């Protein structure tokens, strides 16, 4: 039977839909740039001198680092083990990454988090407090599939897919693909049966400073871990380690909200993805068993505070592109469906940012479509790998702004969800389970026309 906006669902749509979605999802920071470079523009309200700072950060984000020793001492110290030699290699044109396209393809814009189950030892308790998980004793917290000359890569990521068919109430079907991740050619012995591995593609970079500027109180106001309002949604914030002040804070960034700030997120990426140390992250992911002390480093630290500040400023001020096709009746109908289906229960449409160190990001009305909280997404999306207070079935709600530009920026069909398994937005919706299962079931009951309207709305963001 076709899904119709009647009765209770229609009432819910009007109640939630009183708040119109503006053409400028990033407030005054919004860019009007379209096409392949839509994600790579500075916040539109940055002053001239701050745009120069943005350009400096862009150069360190885009250009490759090299192994030490080198004549370029501002960019040396890569490795010995790493995933990529430049931030831009993972965040392609500041957009999302993708899984390997075929067996043997480089996994450069997708990484694999590693850990083992925790025991009761003090060392493991310390790991859980500061890292959120217990790293593998040999392979560390992340598989690094590249190495400088003379060093041995940790292994090669291999992904194979199985398929399953989902049937709509009208009889039409969609084939979903489920990834199965393994590590081939392990460079330091078999990881063992306790290994927990979680594949993650690089998320898009737009609007991150605005997300950082959302007041903590606004995020915590959305928590409902015990489902006291009986809507089936039990979002909660991740509480993570803040390295700068050495205490627990609210997580916002990463697929499981495992990082509290962009500065710490960037320092963690330098250390884990490129083997580069900083004052905030003085150790990379190389373990004692791998003997990385044998290789030259680029200084202590390898990433100076000035470089880390520049990259952080850049990542804070990448603008969100303006929405398109807001007056299209298909888009407007799709927005009403989005609200009536219950999608806004996690993908909160709007916030107003608070005071931020950057005036450009302060006091902006924004429309990111996320609550930045953790939600149980069911067994099908589970990686069974905890991270701080995020369980093995839980993921942070990803922002939806900029979705309509994803394939243009990528230069190929974009991939969605944490591991890139979804080849279309509809596939991404159909993988939702757990707290989102009721919304997914309503999509399965929708007519073909209504499904087209929903996708038209998502592509307008």
Image (cartoon, grey):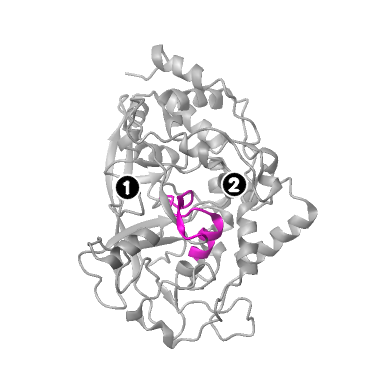
Image side of residue 458 versus residue 152, left or right: right
> Gap between marks 2 and 1, in whole Å?
30 Å
Quadrant occupied by the C terminus:
top right
Residue bearing mark 1: 177
Number of the front mark, 2 or 1: 2
Image side of residue 341 versus residue 353, left or right: left
Callout 2 crowding tier (Cα within 10 Å): few <14, some 14–19, many ≥20 = many
Above or below for 369 versus 71: above
Counting from the top left corner in percent of width and height, residue 204 is at 53, 51
Please name whichever residue, 73 or 169, is drawn nearer the observer in this view of the structure. 73
Callout 1 crowding tier (Cα within 10 Å): few <14, some 14–19, many ≥20 = some
Above or below for 160 versus 374: below
Counting from the top left corner in percent of width and height, residue 151 is at 41, 83
> SS of the residue at dot 1?
strand
Residue 263, magenta (yes or no)? yes
Residue ranking furthest to the right: 48
**Rendered image: mark on residue 459:** none
User: Residue 366: in sight, yes or no?
Assistant: yes
Residue bearing mark 2: 207
Residue 334, magenta (yes or no)? no
Extent of the magenta region? 245-269
Please name whichever residue, 207 or 40, is drawn nearer the observer in this view of the structure. 207
Please name whichever residue, 33 or 191, is drawn nearer the observer in this view of the structure. 191
Q: Residue at x 63, y 30 (%)?
A: 22
Q: Residue at x 35, y 54 (%)?
A: 387
């Amino acid at each position: 039977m076709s899904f119709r906006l009647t009765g209770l669902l229609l009432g819910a749509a009007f109640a939630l839909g009183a708040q119109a979605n503006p053409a400028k999802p990033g407030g005054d920071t919004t860019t009007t740039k379209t096409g392949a470079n839509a994600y790579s523009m500075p916040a539109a309200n940055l002053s001239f001198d701050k745009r120069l700072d943005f350009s400096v950060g862009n150069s360190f984000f885009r250009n490759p680092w090299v192994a030490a020793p080198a004549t370029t001492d501002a960019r040396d110290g890569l490795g010995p083990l790493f995933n990529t030699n430049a931030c831009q290699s993972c965040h392609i044109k500041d957009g999302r990454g993708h899984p390997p396209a075929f067996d043997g393809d480089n996994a450069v814009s997708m990484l694999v988090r590693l850990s083992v189950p925790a025991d009761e030892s003090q060392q493991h308790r310390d790991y859980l407090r500061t890292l959120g998980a217990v790293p593998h004793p040999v392979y560390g917290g992340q598989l690094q599939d590249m190495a400088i000359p003379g060093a041995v890569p940790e292994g090669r990521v291999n992904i194979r897919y199985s398929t399953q068919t989902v049937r709509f109430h009208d009889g039409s079907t969609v084939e979903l693909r489920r990834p199965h991740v393994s590590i081939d050619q392990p460079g330091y012995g078999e990881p063992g049966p306790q290994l927990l591995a979680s594949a993650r593609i690089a998320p898009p970079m737009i609007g991150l400073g605005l997300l950082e500027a959302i007041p903590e109180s606004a995020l915590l106001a959305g928590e409902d871990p015990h489902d006291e309002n009986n809507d089936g949604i039990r979002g909660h914030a991740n509480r993570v380690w803040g390295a700068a002040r050495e205490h627990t804070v609210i997580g916002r960034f990463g697929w499981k909200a495992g990082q509290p700030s962009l500065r710490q997120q960037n320092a963690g990426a330098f250390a884990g993805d490129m083997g580069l140390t900083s004052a905030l992250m003085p150790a990379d992911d190389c373990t004692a068993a791998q003997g990385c002390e044998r290789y030259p480093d680029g200084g202590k630290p390898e990433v100076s505070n000035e470089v880390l500040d520049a990259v952080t400023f850049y990542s804070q001020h990448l603008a969100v592109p303006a929405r398109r096709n807001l007056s299209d009746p298909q888009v407007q109908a799709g927005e009403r469906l989005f609200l009536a289906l219950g999608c806004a229960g996690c993908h909160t449409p709007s916030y107003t940012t608070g005071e931020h160190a950057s005036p450009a990001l302060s006091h902006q009305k924004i429309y990111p479509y996320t609550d930045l909280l953790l939600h149980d997404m069911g067994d099908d999306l589970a990686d069974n790998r905890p991270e701080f207070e995020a369980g093995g079935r839980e993921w942070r709600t990803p922002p939806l702004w900029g979705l309509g530009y994803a394939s243009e920026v990528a230069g190929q069909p974009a991939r969605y969800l944490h591991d890139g398994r979804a080849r279309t937005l509809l596939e991404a919706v159909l993988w939702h389970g757990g707290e989102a299962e009721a919304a997914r079931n309503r999509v399965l009951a929708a007519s073909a026309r209504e499904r087209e309207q929903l996708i038209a709305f998502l592509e307008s963001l």
